[in-house]
Image (spheres, helix red, strand yellow):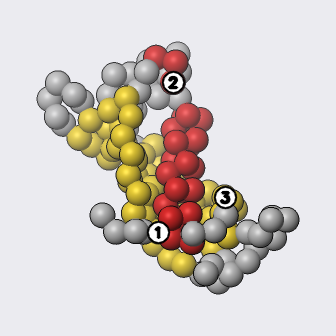
Amino acid sequence: MSASESRFVEMVFPEQANHYGTLFGGTALNLMGRAAFIAATRVARQPVVMAASERVDFRVPVKVGQLIELVARVERIGRSSLTVSVEMLAETLTTGERILAIQGRFIMVAVDAEGHPVPVA
């Protein structure tokens, strides 16, 4: 794993689910935003904020009891921005089957103490 990639794994619990028993979309976006933040901060080594989320594709539902692995990769570094792709893989513990469940791209921007964009060091 390179410095431009971050991963974390967690279990989907009932309190993260919607009324269908699958991962609530807002929770999924929150987790993906956290993953993008971690990856961008590890590369920039300075404060970053989310400026935009680009297309996010919910490919398959993630069920309560599945493991999710978030993989965030910095794809591009601009003057003050970092483009981060995030994939959420869902794994069924009893079978080991893994599938790409959600993917998206996020634009993170390096900022100073007042929240103004600054060059990525």
Q: Is label 3 in a helix, a strand or a loop?
A: strand
Q: Residue at x 50, y 51 (%)?
A: 35
Give left or right: position of 118 versus 6: right
Residues marked 3 and 1 touching at CB (< 8 Å): no
Q: State the CA–CA distance, disc 2 to disc 1.
A: 27 Å
Q: State the CA–CA distance, disc 3 to disc 1.
A: 13 Å
Q: Is label 1 in a helix, a strand or a loop?
A: strand
- Specify few, some or many for label 3: CA neighbours under 10 Å numbering under 14, 14-19, or 20 or more: some
Q: Where's the N terminus, which quadrant?
A: bottom left
Q: Which residue is mark 3?
A: 50
Circle on res. 74 = 1
Q: Which residue is mark 2?
A: 16
- Residue 47 in percent (x, y) is at 67, 64
Q: Pick whichever, 47 or 79, lies toward us.
A: 47
Work out whether 2 lies above or below 36: below
Residue 21 in view: yes
Amino acid of disc 2: Gln
